[in-house]
Amino acid sequence: MMKVRKAVIPAAGFGTRFLPATKVVPKELLPVVDKPTIQYIMEEVASSGIEEVILITGREKGSIEDHFDTSTELEEHLRKKKRMDLLRMVQRISEMVTLVSVRQKEPLGLGHAILCAKKVVGQEPFAVLLGDDLIDAERPCIRQMIDIYQKMDGALLAIQKVPKTETHLYGIIRGRRVSDRVYRVEEMVEKPKQGTAPSNLAIIGRYILPPQIFGILEKVSPDPRGEIQLTDGLRELSQRLPVFGYEFIGDRYDAGDKLGYLQANISLGLKHPELGPKLKRYLKELSGKS
Ligand code: UTP
C-alpha cells in the first residue's frame, strides 16, 4: 500500500451561503476564535504526517496563499518590537507544509476542483479535506483515516450519523458494517429527498482517494447546475474498486454555513485556555436573560 503523502484542499467555491461576509473575504479565511478556518485544516494535515498540500483556489483567493506565505514586513515589525512570541507564531504558519496552489478558473463543482489537482498528485492515493469543514478531534481526523486506509484498497470516505431531518443536506450512504466504525459502501445518494434516504450516515468533507478517480471525474457529466459532482465520480469508482466509509471520532462543524460557523466559535471558544472561562460566564449570563 502506498503512503498518503499529499492532500488536496479545495477552496475555490463562491461561499454564497455566507454572503455578504464572503463578497471579498474567502469563507476559508473567516476566523474561528483566533485562527482562519483553513489554518485548522492545514494544522490537521501537518500533524497527520502529510508532506505536501495542493490548494485549489479561485477568484479573490490569493489571500489564502498569502496567509501561508512568509510575511517579511510583519516579521520585521514584530522583531523590532521584540514580540518574539508573535513572531514565532507567524513564522510557524508558513513553515507548516509545502504548499502548491492550482487555480480553478470557474467553480464548476467539487469533482472539478479535485480534477484540477490531477497533474500535481500523479499516480498515488491522496487525501481531500474541504476548506470549510472543521473537525475538532483528539487524533486528527485525516490521521485516523490514514491509519484505517493502510489496511485497505480503494477509497475511504469520512462519515457521520446525522439527524433524519437533515439527511437531505448531505450525500448519504447505504453500507454494510465490516469492522468497528467501518462500512463497505453499497449505495450513495446526493442530497436525497426527505424521507427517501437509505440511512442517516452522511459523507463529511474528508476523503482518501485513489488516483483512478481522476480518469473517472474527466468523464462525469455535469449535473443540471453545470457542476461536476464528486459523488457521481465516487459512485462510478465503487463499480471498479471497493469504497469504504469510516465513522470518525471527533466533532465536525460546517464553517461555511452561518449556524455551523457560530457553533464552531462557541465550542472552540469554550475550549480556549484564556477565553474559555470568560465566554462560559457570558453564556450563563445570556441564558439567564432569556
Ligand atoms: P461548498 O459547496 O461548501 O462550497 O463546497 P461553495 O460552493 O463555496 O458553497 P456555497 O453553497 O456557495 O455557500 C465545499 C468545498 O469545496 C470547495 C469550496 O471552496 C469548499 O471549501 N469548492 C466547491 C471548490 O473548490 N470548487 C467548486 O467548484 C465548488
Image (tube, rainbow, N blue to C red):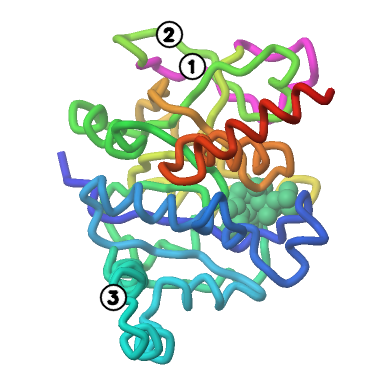
Q: Nearer the viewer, mark 3 or mark 2?
A: 3
Disc 1 versus disc 2: distance between alpha carbons?
7 Å
Task: Name the kind of residue labelled 2 in the image.
Answer: Arg
Q: Are marks 1 and 2 in contact (CB under 8 Å)?
A: yes
Precedes in sequence: disc 1 or disc 2: 2
Q: What number is the disc on residue 75?
A: none
Position of residue 275 relative to residue 267, above or below, is below
Q: Which mark is in front, 1 or 2?
A: 2
Q: CA distance from mark 1 to mark 3?
A: 54 Å
**Coordinates of residue 187 in the picture (x, y in percent):** 55, 19
Mark 2 Cα shell of 10 Å, populated few (<14), some (14-19), many (≥20): few
Name the secondary structure under disc 3: helix
Q: N-terminal of the two: label 1 or label 3?
A: 3
Name the one closer to the observer, 47 or 279: 279
Any mark on residue 176, and which?
2
Circle 2 sits in a helix, a strand or a loop, which is it? strand
Residue 191 lies, in percent from the top left, at 71, 29
Residue at 73% of width from left, 62% of height from top? 22
Q: Which residues are magenta?
A: 182-199
**Mark sitting on residue 186:** 1
Horizontally, is 56 left or right of 259 in the view?
A: left
Residue 203: x, y in percent? 54, 29
Task: Report the side of 206 relative to 194 (left or right).
Answer: left
Q: Which residue is mark 3?
A: 84
Give the alpha-carbon distance from disc 3 to disc 2, as whole Å: 53 Å
